[in-house]
Image: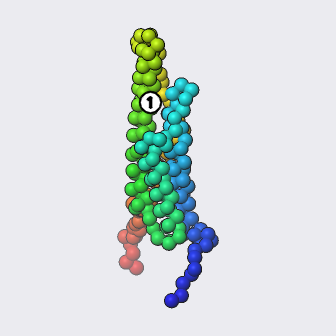
Amino acid sequence: MEGRAGVTVRDMLRPGMRGYLVPLAAGISLTVSAFLPWVIVGEYSRRGVPDLWAIWIAGLGALASVLATLSMITRKNSRHPLLVVGLLALGLTFLAWRIVPRAAEQGARTWAQAVAIADGVSAAAVPETHALVGSGIYVGLVAAIVLVCFGLTIVIRRAHTYVVSDPDDDV
């Protein structure tokens, strides 16, 4: 039985599979976004990694990268799984974008009130804290949107151009 010993980079980057570099880069970006700051409260920033949200995002990014790499190696289409992974990642990052900053604000306020009570100061005297969304969530959102758009290319197909025949074609 004849076969090739391995797949070279040149084989992976043939014209039919170059498009899978897009989900590969998006998957790597999604994984990296879990390690970037997700929330900034005052002068403190908090990375996403210790939270369960970020672990899922990192896992989905790694899965997208593996799927894109396997597609380039085997030359098989994996856009449906990439669409599912992208939708999951988009849902998680969107929820994290809406929930995590509020939870960080509440946690910081609770901590400040506990310190104020321990110091003998009224808890009502604690100033309000505001949390900002860090760059990690935005990078994750963009990477997830790219994965979803790439996965949707298998669903959205070009419409056929209809040719209208001339009514006087009885020649």
Query: Taking 93 as reference, is 109 above or below it?
Result: above
Q: Residue at x 52, y 64 (%)?
A: 69
Indicate how the structure is coloured in the image: rainbow
Q: Amino acid at mark 1?
A: Ala
Residue drawn at x 38%, y 72% is 168
Residue 88 vs residue 35, the one in the foreground: 35
| Residue 150 visible in the displayed image | no
Q: Is residue 13 visible?
A: yes
Pick the front one: 12 or 62? 62
The residue closer to the viewer here, 31 or 97, is 31
Residue at label 1?
104
Residue drawn at x 49%, y 67% is 71
Q: Quadrant of residue 102?
A: top left
* Residue at figure coordinates x 41%, y 10% from the top left: 122
Q: Secondary structure at mark 1?
A: helix
Which residue sits furthest bottom?
1
- Dot 1, how many residues are within 10 Å of its Cα: few (below 14), some (14-19), or many (20+)? some
Split into 4 quadrants, where in the image is the C terminus? Answer: bottom left
Q: Is residue 157 left or right of residue 43?
A: left
Is the residue 13 above or below the residue 58 in the image?
A: below
How far from the left and from the top, in percent, is residue 60?
A: 45, 53
| Residue 38 horizontal/vertical position (percent) | 50, 37
